[in-house]
Image (tube, rainbow, N blue to C red):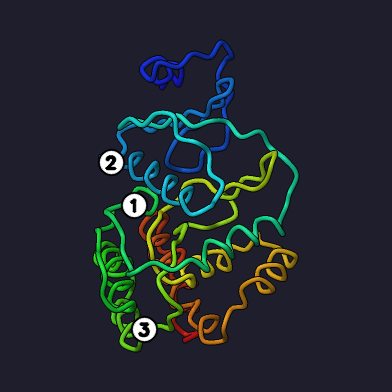
Amino acid sequence: MDPRALLRRAGLEAKALPVPLHGGDIARVWRVGPYVVKLAENPPPGLFAAEARGLAELGKRGVRVPPVLHVAEEGLVLAYLAPGKEDWEGLAAMLAHLHRQREAAYWAEPGFLGTFPLPGRQGGEWTEFFFLRCIEPFLKATWERLEGLGPQVEALFRDPLPTEGPAPLHGDLWHGNVHFAQGGPALLDPSFFVGERGVDLAMMRFFGGFPPVFWRAYEALYPVPEAVARALPRYQVYYLLAHVHFFGQGYLGALWKAISAF
């Protein structure tokens, strides 16, 4: 994979040599002068288009994201945001502003968590929406590897989840998708949809990486009700099923712990 080939097809030029950047498990990422180029071999159709849409949706709602300069089936070209100092309080303000916004209904376009395809869905009651859009597809994909935990996962969503109102979400908000850039923090690699902010909070709590200074600032701006805090393990089941799918049964212990917490 040559990132300069995608730049040429995009009508962009950079004299600098490609410099590899951290790109996770899905794509290889390079900085080429003022550009960031993401490429993947045989990605699922629509993967990078969905990422570009998610960045655009976050940007429209006041979140700083890298500008998308070109979208292709095999990759993306983004503007390079030079690294800056950590600003956890600035990140908290940006996320509180995002999560406070309200939309008319829950909705999601067809998209991805990692490379796993998720269906689109429009409207309806939140618990059913979240189960059918986020939980059920992973349950079907992992059922034979769950060692009997599948029915217990289903039972978690028989009772309603707490609701605050439809809010725009990053959807895959672990610390690796936060970039502290010059001029302020930015978010990367979204799995955007409109749901309840507990989904984002659950992922942020699940992997850690968000220090106390962040949580103090976020809570001061947008306090988390006790009912939402209690529901976070139910949302974490979504990401744990994804980890079972991508990485195997080593995550069953954590899945059982999340189930038992409810």
What amino acid is at disc 2?
A: Gly
What amino acid is at disc 3?
A: Leu
Residue at 68% across, 69% down: 215
Residue at 57% across, 37% down: 22
- Looking at the image, is mark 2 or mark 3 earlier in the sequence? 2
Residue 105: x percent and y percent? 32, 70
Q: Identify the mark at residue 156; answer none if there is no mark.
A: 3
Q: From the image, tell me which residue sits under label 1.
A: 112
- Looking at the image, is mark 1 or mark 3 earlier in the sequence? 1
User: Position of 254 compared to 181: left or right?
Assistant: left
Position of residue 72 relative to residue 91, above or below, is above
Instruction: Determine the image quadrant of residue 45.
Output: top left
Position of residue 153 relative to residue 203, above or below, is below
* Circles 1, 2 touching at the beta carbon (< 8 Å): yes
What amino acid is at disc 1?
A: Phe
Q: From the image, tell me which residue sits under label 2.
A: 46
Disc 1, SS? strand
Instruction: Determine the image quadrant of residue 239.
Output: bottom left
User: Position of 208 compared to 77: left or right?
Assistant: right
Q: Residue furthest bottom?
A: 159
Disc 3, SS? helix
* Between marks 2 and 3 in the image, the one whose residue lies nearer the viewer: 2
Q: What is the CA distance from the residue labelled 1 to the residue labelled 2?
A: 9 Å
Disc 2, SS? loop
Numbered marks: total: 3
- Using the image as rendered, state which of residue 149 and residue 18 is in the foreground: 18
Dot 3 crowding, Cα within 10 Å, few <14, some 14–19, many 20+: some
User: Position of 73 compared to 7: left or right?
Assistant: left
